[in-house]
Image (cartoon, grey):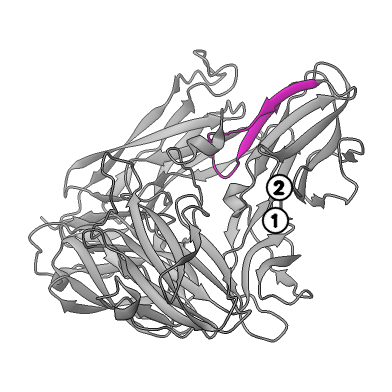
Amino acid sequence: MNAELLRRVCRRVGRCAVIASWLAAGLPALPGESAAAPPEITAIYPGGGQRGTHVTLTLQGKVDPAHLQLWCDQPGVELIGPAGKDSVELKIAPDAAPGWCWLGFFNAEGAAGQRPFQIGTLPEVLEAEPNDRLVSASSLNLQPAVVCNGVLDKRNDVDTFPFSLAAGQTVVASLAARQPLGSPVDAVLQLVDARGFVLAHSDDAEEFDPRLVFTAPREGVYAVRVFGFPATPDSSIRFSSGANYVYRLTLASGPVAGWVFPPAVPANKPSTVQPIGWNLPLETRWELPPLSPGVHLLHGVHVPSGSEAVSFARVWVTPWDCLSAAEENSQAQPQPVAIPACVAGRLAPQREHAWKFAAKKGEVVMLKAAARELGSPLDVLLRVMDASGKLLQEVDDAPQAPVDVRLEFQPPSDGDYVAMIRDRFAHGGTDYLYALTIAPPQPEFVLSVAGDAFTFPPAKDFELTVHIEGRDGFDDEVELTVEGLPEGCTAEPVKVVPMGAGTAGRGGRRRNNSAPSNSAKLVIKTTKTDGWAGVFRVVGRTTGDTPQERYAVGRPPNSPVPRPQLLAVIPAK
């Protein structure tokens, strides 16, 4: 199956932040005056702001700012109050942690789905109409970088951002719209000269979102143009627009990091990586603090001059030490590795890397490769060969982020095997990075719920359906509980075994006699009638030999990023 062709209709992403401080208490008291209806918010604009500033946030949808309150999944973002009939004023603290946070707006009647909001360190501007043409757009200062907030809200809208470059100066333009803002736009970037001639073009770099790099051949005025098409293709042949086509465009002429090498590091210990990008001194190294397993976007990193680099780089944090590919690594000279392990490399055109590992018959080996999730353009093709070079298995797509490829290998006999990894189209370059884990299966389960904001009726029961999925042979019983509920609100634990998890999951029963299922219902009982708003979590725990704990995630409206914190309101009766 050609992954490149499918990628425009099948996109996948997975990441989530874990903040626990809001679970111990409810949100600020709800106002005594009742709002007419729960807020319905389809988009917010702008999609972020610089820390240490105030931001006027426009709320698209049905909302009364006078009755709104705000929850944020991290400290440093405060709702000041209404700023207009459809807007509010936010205050971002100077010491707020940079990166993406999540805003949940609510009133006395209910809550709207959470919205992503980026806390930035760079100067920010809002697009000023008219800016469809270079002659009518306001010029920008790129020393060293600026974030342009815009929305493609008019029919056939095109936004233009002009600036000056010296001969030989490099500018990086990177747009965030679909990831993770959830804007339903397949955006395009073009760089043009003062006459309007297109000199550079990008329509996909980070899944739907484009990025381009341009070095000026001569001093002069240049401009970046933004326009888009619907993320879900339709029959129209024209530029697309909408009030929810919100984007953030970063323009940088200073140091920019797009990737790091190695792209994977071990969990819970300090690591050193080399940033890869533009306008970076060769000696630049970043010291990373201990990180938890998962994919992390890197912020607040500096170059030797002391200035902070603009960073789009991500790193995959794994439970194992990571081995980097040697220069001579090839099919003729496979590099040995003892499993379980994580290996990483960078592929040149027409090159492939080979990793030799020992395996025994009857002991399954799981191979998982990540590239796209790390910002790499590498379209992974993964093969497993025996010692004689015979092809045993091959795969080029996986259904579960953050991995691009997932291969379950059952050795036919004891011996040495070779994992071969390359780009499906034999492309390569400094940004063609990958990370590959080779290890026994790690059985696990995943929990999810429909939505991320709920209204519990006062003095009534509320049924919450929790979906459970077992992966890689998981066959244990999971106990579901609810954390963060207020006094007068309870939920009895429920035990469930995921359907299809392991051999016994295919229609059988476990030793505890639990029937397999794809979902379970938690009944939240409340006697509370005086109103409440807060954050709760659904947590699943196993009781087997290797205890696991997972939080159920809910997906905000139109967002590709699931959320482990669930917002709830109990209206006063």
Query: How far apart, in angstroms, are the residues tagged by discs 2 and 1?
Result: 6 Å
Q: Residue at x 33, y 42 (%)?
A: 232
Helix, strand or loop status at disc 2:
strand
Q: Position of residue 281 (x, y in %)?
A: 74, 77
Instruction: Quadrant for residue 85, please give it.
Output: bottom left
Who is closer to the viewer here, 487 or 96? 96
The stretch of residues the image draws in magenta is: 391-410
Q: Is any part of residue 117 visible from this angle?
A: no
Outermost residue toward the top in this view: 508
Q: State yes or no: residue 215 in magenta.
A: no
Whether the residues at callouts 2 and 1 have beta carbons within 8 Å, the answer is yes
In the image: residue 104, left or right of residue 475: left
Instruction: Quadrant for residue 189, please give it.
Output: bottom left
Type of the residue with mark 1: Pro
Q: Earlier in the sequence, mark 2 or mark 1?
A: 1
Helix, strand or loop status at disc 1:
loop
- Residue on which disc 1 sits: 263
Q: Is residue 24 above or below residue 223?
A: above
- Residue on which disc 2 sits: 435
Who is closer to the viewer here, 269 or 200? 200
Looking at the rendered image, the quarter that the C terminus falls into is bottom left
Q: Residue at x 17, y 47 (%)?
A: 457
Q: Position of residue 279 (x, y in %)?
A: 66, 76
Who is closer to the viewer here, 481 or 344? 344
Q: Position of residue 540 (x, y in %)?
A: 48, 40
* Few, some or many residues within 10 Å of mark 1 (<14, 14–19, 20+): many
Type of the residue with mark 2: Ala
